[in-house]
Amino acid sequence: MQVREAIAQDAGTLAILFSVSNQDAAVGHTAGRYTLTLAPMNPPTSSPFGERRYRAWNEHVKTRYGGRVQKVSVLAGFTCPNRDGSLGKGGCTFCNNASFTPGYLDQRQTITQQLDAGLDFLRRRYPGTQRYMAYFQSYSNTYGELERLRACYAEALAHPDVSGLAIGTRPDCLPDAVLDYLAELASNHIIELEIGVESCNDAALARVNRGHTFATSVDAIERAAARGLEVTAHLMLGLPGESVDSMLDGARLLSKLPIHALKLHQLQIVRGTLLARDWQRDPDTVPLLGEEACINLLADVIERLSPRILLQRVGSEVPPSQKLAPEWNVRLSELAPRISAELARRGSWQGYHYVQDVSKQ
Ligand code: SF4
């Protein structure tokens, strides 16, 4: 094995890129990446993340890029295999893309026109922003012919105010050729690959008609990270079929993966989804987290996450016009401080109950 590069990601984490040659067995060369968390000589006795008590994405980005980095959503007209019939037609039972697609987007416009409209809006809303990334958010944005992906990404990157791409997709839409292309782009641009893991529990994934297993996510994340790509995983807490134990175990399983960041969402019932239909027929079939239970669970999960993982989101907010349940509503701007306050009340922080586990998944 040859160590190609060792990259200090932060004070406590080392990413090691390696290659292996096994010509005797005629299997050619393989490459990979290990992320090592270096155990401090003395475990921290107070929050290493200040008052926030978790490793916050926004602060990391400000340090790394010298200021705020804002994502500008674009609709490139992709669909997803769980909707177009190649895998399924109904989609994931919780999904209604309209619930997270900004209202100013118009798919009839070119990507450049959408970026101009989004930048116009965001420049006024966040005047101190340093850089912008085109955000391919809705549906599965690596699901298509490579030539089409190249054309979409290239158009976004050609915009003079765009420094990079954030690309949201499913783990089963990431063939090696697409990952190779993204790795090529990442040598000159900020590239963030957002993979919808949603759950580490196959029973829950099946219940929401996700159409892939956790092993599919593990495989995609490992192949992406092996190419040096920074992966943000999406996780949905409270899916039907999950228990508190399975979700806490999910934090342990995700911590073993070479993910760079995590977005946590809590399950909400959105109009027009299959889950909404089930909930309206019989709410008992879709138990939802109450407000306090949700904040407690988020704190529990964060305590069990590896301290090296950046938290890009600690909850989600659905526009009131599209949300059916739960009744409680905490704005995102309030949710994050509530979680920090809960961690402070416990005297804990991200990774407080994290146990490094080097066994295979
Ligand atoms: S959540 Fe993603 S994968 Fe599932 S149906 Fe919606 S777009 Fe498709």
Image (spheres, rainbow, N blue to C red):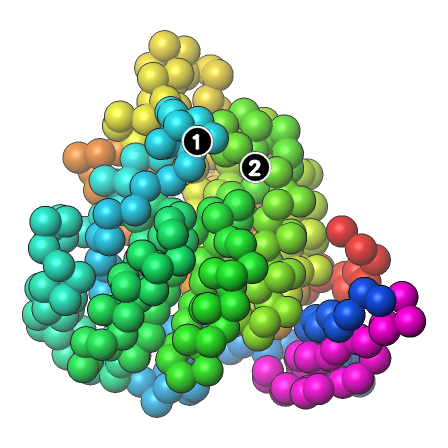
Residue beneath the point at 52% across and 68% down: 180
Residue drawn at (59%, 82%), measured in percent from left and top? Answer: 9
Q: Is mark 2 in CB contact (under 8 Å) with mark 1?
A: no
Q: Earlier in the sequence, mark 2 or mark 1?
A: 1
Asked if the magenta segment contains residue 3, the reply would be yes
Q: How many marks?
A: 2
Check disc 1 and report the residue beneath it. Answer: 86
Q: Residues within 10 Å of mark 1 (few under 14, many from 20)?
A: few
Camera-side residue of 332 and 128: 128
The quadrant in which residue 134 appears is: bottom left
Q: Which span is picked out in magenta?
A: 1-25
Q: Is residue 244 above or below residue 276?
A: below
Q: Residue at x 63, y 29 (%)?
A: 203
Instruction: Quickly name the residue at label 2.
Output: 212
Q: Amino acid at mark 1?
A: Ser
Give the amino acid at mark 2. Answer: His
Front residue of 53/271: it is 271
Above or below, comparing residue 140 to residue 19 in the picture = above
